[in-house]
Image: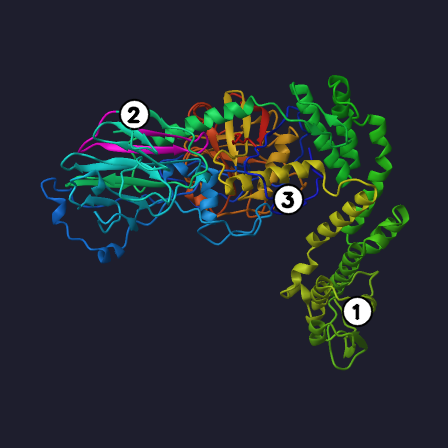
Amino acid sequence: LMTNTSSNSISSRRNPLNSATAAHLALMSNSPGPTYPMTNPMSNPPPAMLSGQISAPYSRPTITTYLLNTSTSHASGSTSRSAYNASSSALSINTSNKQLKSKTLKPKLPEYLADTSFAELYYNSNMERSNSTILDKNPLENLSLPTAWNVDDKCAHLNVEPDKLRVNYIGSGKYDTDAAAIRANYPMPPQCGLFYFEVDIISKGKDGFIGIGFCSKQVHLNRLPGWEPDSWGYHGDDGHSFCCSGTGKPYGPTFTTGDTIGCCLNFRDGTAFYTKNGKYLGIAFQDLKGVVLYPSIGLRTQGESVEVNFGHRNFKYAIEHYMKEEKARLWQAIDTKPLSTISSPLTSAPVSQATSETNLTATVHQLILSYLVHHGYSETAKAFSTDAVQITQTDSNEMEGVESENTFLDLDKDIINRQRIRDAVLNGDIDCAIQLTNEFYPSVLPSNDDIYFRLRCRKFIEMMGLCAGSQITCSDDDEEIGKIDKQEIHGMVTSIKKKKVSKRRRGVGSGLNGLGVIEAAMRFGQELQDDYRDDKREEIKKALEETFSLLAYTDPRKSVVSYLLDPSGREPVANALNSAILVSQGKPPIPPLEQVYRQSSVVLNELARNGVGSSAFSVTLHTDLGDLKIEVFCEAVPKTAENFLALCAGGYYDNNLFHRNVKGFIVQTGDPLGTGKGGTSIWGRKFEDEIKSSLKHNTRGIVSMANSGPDTNGSQFFITYTKLPHLDTKNTVFGKVIDGSDTTLDAIEKLPVDEKYKPIQDIRIKSVTIHANPLAERD
């Protein structure tokens, strides 16, 4: 749809939110999008296929999909130790606290959390933050997970072994006052959605007065879990649960030596449950909100010994399955929640609550149309409005105040004028852009000195680009041309020194006088510097210093500042000028579609920071064989996400074939031509990779961009059938299948294919649903 869409980088400033506020917005469009040819076929196969896979010629995928929740590979750790000798008395263990400084297991993210938005936050908090136009640059708070017992936060009656996982009771054990508890080294972060750990009962000791649970930091550790305020526990001797009181109530079976007890906190609904030997025991506690909680265990009689598993080895309970069920319940709640009242992007008239697919689709059409109008894509906007706006008027009686087609076409002249100005900047003709702006919008540049300054700096850069192209060389015996000295560039000095420049030039077009270009550039540079000589703004000084640094090099194209000459630098200037023109007309500087995207990303990020465990961003591909729900990693790969979601919103992927299907490898789609050689990005060009070390092709269901080499992403994407580590540094991972992997994806993989791996039976993406701000309400 948006083949001419500008490549505004989606960015956001941190927007503090009330943690009690939950937002929900669902965007859905069933409109088919036009097809655009992609001139570059797939090429450059990877060096090798995985063993056991097909050996036929292989072309690298050319596809992209995109998820919020990251999937990261984690090396599994294991504890190698001798079995505990039940006949040994815990009193005979002489491990001192000094010995506890020995190396313990390296922390790792439990597998059940690997495919959640928390994973991205977790890894970003433990490594250098990658550049992102979505995330702000403030460091994340500590998101460490419990990994061991805290030897400095325990009762003296307990002995902790060097691995900091096994705890033994060494007290007298005669009275209740002899009870002893210990807390984990870190609290359970609500951002993870749910947290689960298991405790192996190595020995029940004399009486088995063992409590397993959690508590706040303030709880005294001379009582079993559950006996004190802000403390909860499940006790093995009677099977009772204790909630902040010494009086318990029947909950589950008793437990003894050899049993494994699991404990799970669900931060989404504020509940906790236990398991015994891998079996679910039911909800034990409710209303667990507003308290920072640590895993905790308590022992009271001689010989008692337990060992905790915080995820460094496999659990007995299938917590991953429980996590999937929780996600399914959440998505069901999200999908049935109505769209809240919003405003039309083309007018200030309110749009009533969407109660039908027609109203929702009309709203999306308006978002898209306003985006095209904002960026001045006249022809595309007119073609789109012929259908979209007409549908809005005829099918949505409640949407009063929507711009009519005639009203929209009245804007055609303005769109054309802004597009002419934008094209002039993008073509490097800054003088033309300034002339047109003064002609059509005479008040814009006088009232936006910063925009005018940026235009003039860009003009100087364009002139220096022409100078570099003319290949003028310096000598000591030819015509003198004024040049700003390198040292004076740094000091922002205005004096001009003389330097002789050779008349010899190479590669200059017949209509271009190389010396004339240099003379003009020098005169304009002097004029620019004179005009801002007395300007005290630091940003002006830095911009001039950077711009004039081009003069310090004989051939700036081969210098460290060659990036200034890159044509891509024209686009931010064109966008800034376009926004200034719109603001002068009383219109928003940012189109509503981008505002929706930015707000959704910021809300999700802030909710994750503030402890909301049910934040995510996803799309559902409705295929001929069923649905595939994909979680999009918006924070990790913002540009890829922007491209994918915009194409989804515009119906670009509707009716796309799954044109390549290699069993045990990948399935590929996203080409509207269905040949594997079509498709383009929303910017009408290839865009760069966003390879992240934390995002890997490490499991089935990873969604990744297809390409024909580095930085050649378009619209095509693929979904993996297995681990493909050789693609980690070649293709941008932007999502993961979170629902439909064991049904729809399996069915697609089993399809018979021809010799070129094209399915014999046509299987298509019928439509795409975008889910934005799928957040559960909080108290």
Q: Secondary structure at mark 1?
A: loop
Dot 1 and dot 2 residues touching (CB under 8 Å): no
| Residue located 25% across and 32% down the image | 235
Residue 515 location, x and y as percent? 81, 69
Return the residue at label 1. 534
Visible residue check, residue 255: yes
Q: Quadrant of the N terminus?
A: top right
- Left or right of 29 in this view: 285: left
| Residue located 23% across and 58% down the image | 98
Circle 3 or circle 1, nearest the eye: 1
Q: As shown in the figure, which amino acid type bears the numbered disc 3?
A: Ile
Q: As shown in the figure, which amino acid type bears the numbered disc 1?
A: Asp
Return the residue at label 3. 10
- Left or right of 707 in this view: 55: left
- As measured in the structure, the alpha-carbon distance from the residue carrying label 2 to the one carrying label 3 is 54 Å
Residue 17 location, x and y as percent? 59, 40
Residue 594 location, x and y as percent? 67, 39
Mark 1 and mark 2 lie on one chain; the one further toward the N terminus is: 2
Return the residue at label 2. 249
Position of residue 126 relative to residue 119, above or below, is below
Position of residue 716 relative to residue 486, above or below, is above
Position of residue 302 relative to residue 513, above or below, is above
Mark 2 and mark 3 lie on one chain; the one further toward the N terminus is: 3
Mark 3 and mark 1 lie on one chain; the one further toward the N terminus is: 3
Q: How packed is label 3: few (under 14 Cα within 10 Å), some, or many (20 or more)?
A: some
Magenta segment includes 271: yes
Magenta range is 253-274
